[in-house]
Image (tube, grey):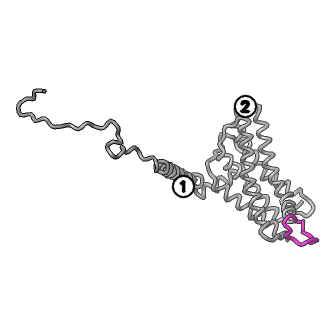
């Protein structure tokens, strides 16, 4: 027998069972039944929050405000300067898209006036839709082509500057369309080519001088200038000679106009 100290009363101890099931209830482990759904819900919330933040960030009008925040007097001065070919050091191109957008809308109005004054009528909005596409899409597409050419020829210029520069140069197109709407000989296009040389060629040269000054390689300057002048003059030539042809083809495809109805072609934009 063991000797216990005075005042100590031994108490019987129960031996713990060696098998957990002997206690009656098995120990509770982690619950994995809802873990997958909780993780999926958390990932969905995180992704939705990120998409909303990105949309709010890029969808704010403040991102586009600097490109349209211009004064009317600034737009007027840039319109007048677009006709004057200067030294590249005297040409300042700003991140201005308001002026070009207004110029393109004006060009759409002139095209509609040209076609309607000639008696060329099309139903279902084909005329207006084609005019919008011909002007806005051409502005964006031709500016993209110029930017690609500048990139290939190592010209340091931003895409916004190309949009602004080419957009303001289209002011000369509006002037030519306006003057040919007021007066144009029926069978002689010398008047059109004279106006193109007076108004469009200086605008094209101004744009060519500026872009060539941003080109690193001197051997590329002549190529870039030729491309810029060619694109600028070819577009006004298309508006004068080819726009009504495109309208007639679209009208024939859609079947808007009655058959065997002659169309007057002695118009400012006709061939």
Q: Is 262 or 41 nearer to us in this picture?
A: 41
Q: Secondary structure at mark 1?
A: loop
Please, which residue is most extreme toward the left here?
6
Which residue is at a point 77% across and 56% down the rendered structure image?
A: 173
Residue 187 appears at what percent x and percent y? 93, 62
Task: Pinpoint residue 22: horizontal percent, then vertical percent.
Answer: 33, 42
Q: Quadrant of residue 245?
A: bottom right
Closest to the observer: 62 or 81? 62
Res 49 visible:
no
Front-lying residue, 42 or 107: 42
Residue 135 visible in image: yes
User: Magenta segment: does it hold 223?
Assistant: no
Rendered position, 90 above or below 241: above
Q: Name the residue tied to disc 1.
A: 60
Secondary structure under tag 2 reads loop
Q: Residue visible at 75% across and 35% down?
A: 221
- Distance between the Cα atoms at labels 2 and 1? 39 Å
Q: Position of residue 19 (x, y in %)?
A: 35, 38
Q: Position of residue 268 (x, y in %)?
A: 85, 63
Sooner in the amino-acid sequence: mark 2 or mark 1: 1
Q: Residue furthest front?
A: 1
Task: Tell me if mark 1 has few (under 14), some (14-19) or many (20+) residues whose alpha carbon lies within 10 angstroms of its own.
Answer: few
Residue on which disc 2 sits: 217
Residue plotted at (83% across, 59% down): 243
Identify the image quadrant of the N terminus: top left
Task: Assign the magenta stretch its main secondary structure.
Answer: loop
């Amino acid at each position: 027998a063991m000797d216990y100290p005075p005042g100590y009363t031994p108490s019987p101890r129960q031996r713990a069972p060696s098998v957990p099931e002997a206690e009656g209830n098995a120990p509770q482990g982690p619950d994995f039944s809802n873990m997958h759904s909780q993780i999926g819900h958390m990932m969905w919330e995180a992704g939705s929050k990120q998409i909303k933040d990105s949309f709010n960030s890029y969808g704010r009008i403040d991102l586009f405000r600097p490109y349209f925040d211009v004064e009317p007097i600034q737009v007027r001065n840039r319109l007048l300067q677009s006709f004057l070919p200067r030294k590249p050091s005297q040409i300042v191109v700003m991140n201005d898209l308001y002026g070009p957008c207004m110029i393109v809308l004006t060009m759409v109005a002139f095209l509609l006036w040209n076609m309607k004054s000639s008696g060329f009528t099309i139903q279902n909005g084909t005329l207006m839709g084609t005019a919008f596409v011909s002007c806005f899409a051409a502005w964006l597409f031709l500016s993209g082509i110029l930017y690609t050419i500048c990139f290939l020829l190592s010209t340091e210029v931003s895409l916004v500057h190309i949009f602004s520069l080419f957009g303001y140069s289209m002011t000369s197109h509006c002037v030519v369309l306006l003057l040919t709407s007021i007066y144009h000989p029926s069978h002689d296009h010398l008047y059109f080519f004279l106006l193109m040389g007076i108004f469009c060629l200086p605008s094209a040269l101004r744009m060519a001088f500026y872009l060539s000054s941003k080109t690193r390689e001197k051997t590329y300057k002549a190529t870039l200038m030729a491309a810029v002048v060619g694109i600028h003059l070819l577009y006004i030539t298309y508006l004068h000679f080819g726009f009504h042809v495109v309208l007639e083809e679209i009208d024939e495809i859609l079947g808007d106009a009655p058959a065997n109805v002659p169309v007057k072609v002695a118009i400012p934009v006709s061939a």
